[in-house]
Image (cartoon, rainbow, N blue to C red):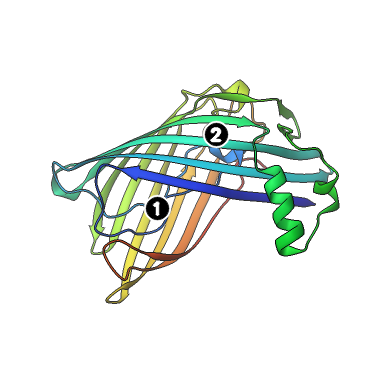
Amino acid sequence: MRWIALPFLIVAGSLASAQDFGLVQTRNHRALSLAFLRFEPRPSLLGPGEQRWDFSITSANDFRFLDTTGGIVEEDYEVQRLVLAFRDGLRNGMEWSIEVPYLSRGGGFQDPIIDWWHANVLHWNDNLRDSTRFGRSISQIPGASFKGSADGLGDISLFLSKPLAKGLVGSVGFKIPTGNANNLLGSGAIDAGIYLQGRLPIARKLALHAQAGLVAQGDAKEIPDSRPLVHQEGIGLVWQPNSRDAWIAQWQGESSASR
């Protein structure tokens, strides 16, 4: 098996700044995963009456090939994900939020950049990737194949979060099927999940963050054998030397969306 999944660029802007930067708000950007509900690490919850708009752009390049007993898994594409999110602080420290994604999947621009990086910086090559032409867009698993470019509205997600204890926040989330499942812009089903995120101060400017979640995935319309339950987990260290900067070491993991 040969695979590369590279989140290349994350640019985020907002109309308000959080006191605690927390972990990077990101998720697995494999196209199959993006079709389902996932939780992202959150900064501190907003106070009553506070509101915030966020806009983010993520570009991810994916390349993998696996010949299994059940068939071929082949993924070679680039996906750009734009997200507009709104957060609103409620009473009792609660917060609700909504995420509206726009997805564009195609050949992209990163292939030659990645090949140059492998050859000139890492001095490493992958014969399969090196022999594959640039600009392909295919996501194929046993029982389903999505070929060519696609773009449009993805599935919209809603979240409600509440502080459970000092440094511990619980959330519930729901995803509604607003994306075109035929083009892998959504799953065509409703998802729901629960999520816990904790923060433990280690020193005055250093904190340990941990996350755990469980998502019940609806029966996907075009993705065969999608998992009914998917777990998420993550851990990270955040060193915040001042009010403007943060150094973050972060790891996240999750089940694959489909078996």
In this figure, which residue is indicated by the disc labeled 1?
41
Identity, as a three-letter code, of the amino acid under mark 1: Pro
Q: Is residue 129 left or right of residue 172?
A: right
In this figure, which residue is indicated by the disc labeled 2?
35
Q: Quadrant of residue 55?
A: top left
Q: Which of 194 and 65 is in front in this view?
A: 65
Look at the numbered disc 1 and give the secondary structure of its residue: loop
- Residue 36 is situated, as x and y percent measured from the top left of the image, at 52, 36
Q: Residue at x 57, y 49 (%)?
A: 7
| Crowd class of label 1 (few under 14; some 14 to 19; many from 20; radius 10 Å) | many
> Residue placed farthest to the bottom in the image?
203
Q: Quadrant of the C terminus?
A: top right
The answer to whether any part of residue 114 appears in the image is yes
- Residue 39 is situated, as x and y percent measured from the top left of the image, at 43, 46
Q: Is residue 245 left or right of residue 259?
A: left
Q: In which quarter of the image is residue 156?
A: top left
The answer to whether any part of residue 219 appears in the image is no
Identity, as a three-letter code, of the amino acid under mark 2: Ala
- Residue 48 is situated, as x and y percent measured from the top left of the image, at 14, 45
Q: Residue at x 73, y 28 (%)?
A: 145
Look at the numbered disc 2 and give the secondary structure of its residue: loop
Marks 2 and 1 sit apart, C-alpha to C-alpha, by 18 Å
Q: In this view, does 243 lie to the left or right of 69?
A: left
Q: Which residue is drawn at 56% across and 29% down?
A: 104
